[in-house]
Amino acid sequence: METMTVLKAMSERRDGDARAVALWLFAVAGLVALMVVIGGLTRLTESGLSMVEWKPITGWLPPLSEAAWIAEFEKYKQFPEYQKINIGMTLEGFQNIYWLEYIHRVLGRLIGLAFAVPMLLFWISGRIPAGMKPHLVAMFLLGGSQGALGWFMVASGLVDHPDVSHYRLTAHLGLAFFIFAYLLWGGLSLLRYGRMVSGRGGGLAAALTVLVFVQVLSGGLVAGMNAGLAHNTWPLMDGAFIPDGLLIAKPWWTNFFENAMTVQFQHRMLAYCVFVLAVVTALSLKGKAATGLRHGLLTAVLVQLGLGIATLLAHVPVSLGTLHQAGAVVVLGMSVALWHDRSLSRDD
C-alpha cells in the first residue's frame, strides 16, 4: 500500500513538472509570436536599418542624453539608407524609427532570458521530463542563431543598397516561425503526453502545416522584394489570372525567387492551395474532439486570406500588413495543433 502511494506521488509530480514546463514553453511561444508581429511592423515602417551596430551583450540601453542621440544619428548618416532615402531627416524623425528597432532587439534579448533562466532552474531542480533536455538545448541554440541571423540580415542593408537581402529576410522570418512551431509542439506534447512526441503521421494536417510554412517563406520573399506594391488588383494580375512576364528571367527558375511578379503570383497561388487543403483537412476530421480545431483552422485561414487580399488592394498599409503577418502566426499555430492532435505517434 505504501509503495502504491509513493508511486502515485511520483507520477503526480512528473505530471506536474511536465505541465509546468509546457506552460513555460507556451509563454515563450507567445513572446516569439509577438516578436514576429513587431518584426513585421519594423519592416513595414522601414525602421530596421536605424541601428547600425550589433551589440548583443551591451546593447540593452537606448541613448539616454541628447548628445548620445546625436552620436547615434551621426552613425546612421554614414550609411546608404540616410544618404539615398532619408537625406535631411531630423533627429526627431530618426528617433521615431530607432525606437521601434530598439524594441525589436530588446524583446529578442528578453525572449532569450525568458527561455534560458527557467530552463536552467528546471534543469537544476530535476523537473525537466525525460528526453526533453536535447530539445530544450536545440531550442536555445536556435534562438541564439536567430539573433545572429537578424544581424546578418541587417548588415546586408548597410553596404551599397539601402534594403536588406530578401533571401536573408526570408531566412530570418522562416526561422522565427520554425522556433514558434517547435515551442508550440513541445508544449502540446508535454501537456498531453508528458514527453516530446514525434511528428510521424498526421496525414493531411501534416501536409497542411508544411504548406503553410512554405507559404510563410513565400511571404518573406514578397516582403523582401516589396512585391506587394505592384499588381494591386484581385483576382486578376495585369488583367489576367495568369499574367504575362512570369518567366522572363534566365535561367527560368530564378523567376521564382527574383522576379517580383512571379513571387507575388506564387504567393497568391499558394494561398489558394492552403485554403483548399485547409477545407479538405477540416472536412476529414471526425468526432466532437476535432470540432474546435476544425472551426479554429477554417476561421484563421479565411481571415488570413481576407487580410492578404485587403493588404494587396490597399497597397500594403502598415496596419493591414502587420495584421497579415500576425494572421500567418495564427494559421501556423492552428495547423501545428491540428497535426499534433492527428499524429499517429500518440499513445492514447
Image (cartoon, rainbow, N blue to C red):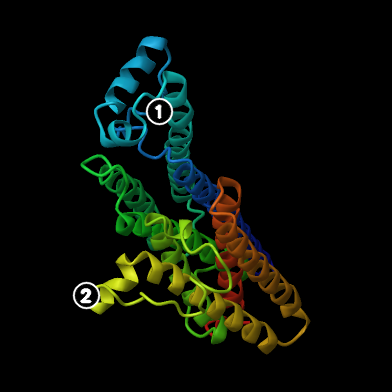
Q: Residue at x 50, y 82 (%)?
A: 207
Q: Residue at x 39, y 40 (%)?
A: 48
Q: Residue furthest toward the right?
A: 288
Numbered circles on residues, count: 2
281 versus 95 height, above or below: below
User: Tag 2's secondary structure?
Assistant: loop
Q: Earlier in the sequence, mark 1 or mark 2?
A: 1
Residue type, label 2: Lys
Location of the C terminus by quadrant is: bottom right
- Residue at numbered disc 2: 250
Q: Residue at x 67, y 82 (%)?
A: 282
Residue 112 location, x and y as percent?
43, 43
Question: In the rendered image, is residue 40 in sight?
Answer: yes
Q: Which mark is residue 60?
A: 1
Image spot of residue 222 (x, y percent): 42, 61
Residue 173 falls in image quadrant: bottom left
| Residue 256 sits in quarter | bottom left
What is the distance, in whole Å, between disc 1 and disc 2 at their CAs? 46 Å
**Front one among 322 and 252:** 252
Question: Which residue is rendered at x = 49% and y = 69% of the image?
Answer: 196
SS type, badge 1: loop
**Crowding near the residue tagged with mark 1, few <14, some 14–19, many ≥20 C-alpha atoms within 10 Å:** some
Quadrant housing the N terminus: bottom right
> Which percent across, then down, holds residue 39?
47, 46
- Viewer-nearest residue: 321 or 246: 246
Left or right: 84, with 24 as reference point: left
Left or right of 122 on screen, residue 256: left
**Which amino acid, mark 1?**
Trp
Q: Nearer the viewer, residue 305 or 193?
A: 305
Q: Would you say residue 132 is visible in this rendering? A: no
Instruction: Report the disc number at residue 18.
Output: none
